[in-house]
Image: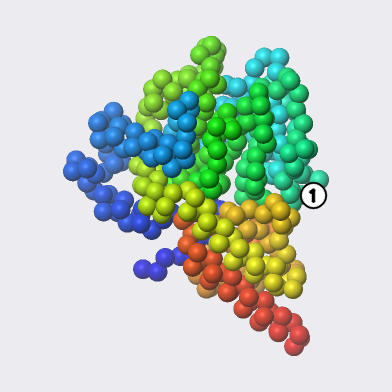
């Protein structure tokens, strides 16, 4: 079977090696005579899988000991509410940096729960850039500052992060976690839906500094309190066992690739191949994001008009490319090149882009 040239924004490509190993263990995990989906989440076998995932994550991300790792459900969208529920203190404010649709949605949920402030915004340009550190303003009344580190729809990404002293930095890293080396100690809380770089949909990672787990929030619903999940090692209720198992396999694969630093180097090369195809097209392709803010995970670009875009997408589909449609907010095309997308697939896309531009331009000249 020929694997698809998968550039979906999420759920996205998974490493072939991970899928192959899962296939081998599909009917019999750890000689139990059962699939991982049939195991009790209270069994020793699943507890070992669960704890292995935590241990691998600590290792590959170099997470300090003063952080808790949680595997939750509800996606990043539930974290939009859980973060202010747990971190926004009475009489304080939550500061949000707007860099795209997901940061807008996070702000919208926080507004329902307390006082919020837009700390900086790139909305005026239809989110073509990431605000500079100097643009981010907050006062002493800040409970936390929230950022979205990569913006899947608009194709922008933070290259460096705000340096905050006494205020926790909260980050939605759903679409670029594990894609590059970060200093976890700079963040108070990191959350990420798994379906881009970590594994399949269904599990959400939360990395929270221990001092931010508040034991006094007795008024919160049990399942929406981080302390509940910390006390129970994310096993208060039945977890998404299959998703956590696959996440552990992805983390094994990350380690086998040489770790996050090695993936960062590959991701940079993948992005360069496609951005070069855009920049060398004599204006036929135009990137949405300003060069300094370009994402290495989601490459967004437009073509001269609707007709050329439609033809590009149709021919790309016939050539085996999947998921290249741009979001309606930007239009055009989007290539999501998460960790599991091979460099060779990016090279094939860049080659297709070049050929399409040449053939389309030649046809236009004849007409």
Which residue is farthest bottom?
A: 366
Residue at left 42%, top 65%?
A: 3
Quadrant the C terminus occupies: bottom right
Please state which of residues 149 and 259 is positioned toward the viewer in this rendering.
259
Q: Identify the colour scheme used.
A: rainbow
Report the residue at 69% width, 25% height from top. Answer: 94
Which residue lies at the image location 75% right of the left edge and 70% below the top edge? 283
Q: Residues within 10 Å of mark 1 (few under 14, many from 20)?
A: few
Residue 79, placed above or below residue 363:
above
Residue found at the very far right of the displayed protein: 124
Image-quadrant location for residue 332: bottom right
Instruction: Provide residue 151's location: percent of width, then percent of height.
Output: 64, 47
Q: Work out whether 279 lies above or below 58.
A: below
Q: Is residue 248 left or right of residue 285?
A: left
Q: Residue at x 67, y 76 (%)?
A: 357
- Residue 132 vs residue 311, the one in the foreground: 132
- The mark total stands at 1
Q: Is residue 32 visible?
A: yes
**59 horizontally vs 350: left or right:** left
The N terminus: image quadrant: bottom left
Q: Is residue 325 visible?
A: no
Q: Secondary structure at mark 1?
A: helix
Image coordinates of residue 330 in percent, x first then y, are: 71, 55
Q: Position of residue 99 (x, y in %)?
A: 70, 43
Give the percent coordinates (x, y) of residue 284.
73, 71
Q: Specify whether 148 is left or right of 231.
A: right
Name the residue tied to disc 1: 125
């Amino acid at each position: 079977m020929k694997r698809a040239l998968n550039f979906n924004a999420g759920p996205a490509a998974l490493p072939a090696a991970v899928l192959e190993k899962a296939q081998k263990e599909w009917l019999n995990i750890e000689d139990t005579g059962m699939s991982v989906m049939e195991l009790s989440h209270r069994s020793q076998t699943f507890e070992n899988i669960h704890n292995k995932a935590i241990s691998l994550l600590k290792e590959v991300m170099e997470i300090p000991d003063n952080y808790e790792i949680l595997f939750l459900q509800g996606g990043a969208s539930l974290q939009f509410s859980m973060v202010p529920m747990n971190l926004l203190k009475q009489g304080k404010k939550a500061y949000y940096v707007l860099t795209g649709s997901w940061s807008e949605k996070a702000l919208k949920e926080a507004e329902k729960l307390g006082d919020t402030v837009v700390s900086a915004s790139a909305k005026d340009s239809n989110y073509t850039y990431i605000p500079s550190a100097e643009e981010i303003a907050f006062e002493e009344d800040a409970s936390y500052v929230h950022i979205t580190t990569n913006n899947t729809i608009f194709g922008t990404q933070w290259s460096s992060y705000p340096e905050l002293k006494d205020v926790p930095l909260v980050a939605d890293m759903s679409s670029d976690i594990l894609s590059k080396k970060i200093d976890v100690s700079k963040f108070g809380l990191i959350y990420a839906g798994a379906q881009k770089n970590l594994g399949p949909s269904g599990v959400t990672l939360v990395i929270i500094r221990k001092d931010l787990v508040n034991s006094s929030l007795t008024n919160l619903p049990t399942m929406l309190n981080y302390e509940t999940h910390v006390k129970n090692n994310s096993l208060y209720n039945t977890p998404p066992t299959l998703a956590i198992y696959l996440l552990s396999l992805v983390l094994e694969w990350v380690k086998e690739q040489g770790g996050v630093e090695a993936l960062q180097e590959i991701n940079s090369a993948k992005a360069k191949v496609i951005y070069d195809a855009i920049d060398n097209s004599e204006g036929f392709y135009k990137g949405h994001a300003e060069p300094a803010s370009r994402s290495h995970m989601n490459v967004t670009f437009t073509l001269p008009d609707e007709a050329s875009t439609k033809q590009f997408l149709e021919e790309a589909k016939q050539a085996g490319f999947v998921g290249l449609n741009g979001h309606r907010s930007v239009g055009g095309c989007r290539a999501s090149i998460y960790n599991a997308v091979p460099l060779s697939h990016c090279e094939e896309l860049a080659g297709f882009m070049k050929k399409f531009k040449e053939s389309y331009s030649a046809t236009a000249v004849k007409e």
